[in-house]
Amino acid sequence: MGRTRSRRPLPRARAAGILGAVVGAAAAGVAAGIAAERALVRRTKAEPGDRYATEDFGRQPYDEAYLIGLADGTDIHVEVVDARRPAGNPTVVFVHGFCLDMGTFHFQRKALAQRGEHRMVLYDQPGHGRSGQLRTGEYALARLGEALKVIIDKTVPEGPLVLVGHSMGGMTIMALAEQYPELFGDRVVGTVLMATSGGRIEQTKFGLPAILSRVAAPLLPVVDNATRLTGTVLDRARKASANVAWLLTRKYGFGTPRPSAALVSYVELMNSRTSTETVARYLRTLYTHARYPALHALRDTPTLVIVGDKDMITPVTHSEEIMRRLPEAEFLKVPNSGHVVMLEHADEVNAALLDFLDRLVA
């Protein structure tokens, strides 16, 4: 029987909303309205009828949990759920996004565990959750692709795989495809790309201008050049109220007019665990992401693309561009959903994911 681990919050800098510390920078610009924001948050959290008010986020059963060391000495926290699955069913590897952790896939992990038909591997990306920070250098997406390859080699050395990536996790899968195209169609028999992009991040500034232009226009020159972002700069920006960060998380992470307050709090908590130095180093590489050619490796691999129609971080146009390059892929656009589509509309996403896996097995 699997054990259950409680995730204790890591030592936390001030919260930064769905975009980590940079959203905190926006929050600093509206600090004068802190009292009103605090009252609004209290009222919102107290509203009755929250279906996830008693959901035990951050606590999931697992069969194995351990650290896997990368070549540079960075330790990666991994959890494995071993199902008594039929022989040949693919192992599902989940890859989370920026300023989040493996808890991003809380509901997908729960649904697959209840079915018991697929082994699951989940891990925290370098600098996120319980994983260590990279010892040297930048958080280049190529290094994240290499880290994913190490995770696969150590946890699923043989047999079919399905890779599921959200946001930066999808970009990590693209980096893996760029470096190891021979894996796709052979080992990797299916790919799920949620709320992600193959490039053009510099054109949307990863969703930042829409936020900053309203509340912190003077910060735009800093954000416009991601290479200027440092831990020191973001530490100063992260002195904003947690209440403002919570409201920004709700506004820019979700698409439903009144999303679950418990869900918003959970996403904001994951954001806040990411150190400012990690945020700065990741933003610099996200701005240079350009891997549409890598999608060619996925042309012969069944692919499911999922996006929320109100995603402000990686807008629908990014998923549509992926579909243009993978015309045989399946496309699910979820109404009234933002960037954390797999949490906000878990039922729809789970139904699509389970159906996708069933057809792969068939």
Image (cartoon, rainbow, N blue to C red):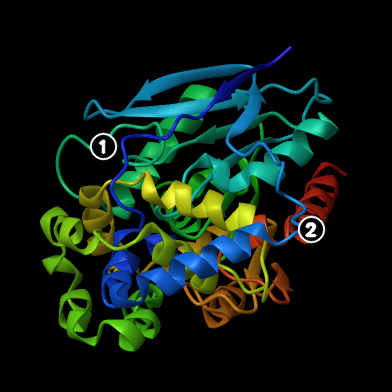
Residue 79 left/right relative to 285: right
Q: Which amino acid lies under the numbered mark 1 shown in the image of this protein?
A: Gln
Residue 62 left/right relative to 157: right
For label 1, the residue is 133
Q: Quadrant of residue 258?
A: bottom right
Q: Quadrant of the C terminus?
A: top right
Q: Nearer the viewer, residue 359 or 218?
A: 218
Residue for point 55% across, 25% down: 6
Residue for point 59% across, 59% down: 193
For label 1, the crowd category at 10 Å Cα-Cα, with few meaning under 14, some 14 to 19 and many 20 or more, is some
For label 2, the residue is 49
Residue for point 36% across, 76% down: 33
Q: Which amino acid lies under the numbered mark 2 shown in the image of this protein?
A: Gly
Q: Quadrant of the N terminus?
A: top right
Q: Quadrant of residue 281?
A: bottom left
Residue 225 got which mark? none
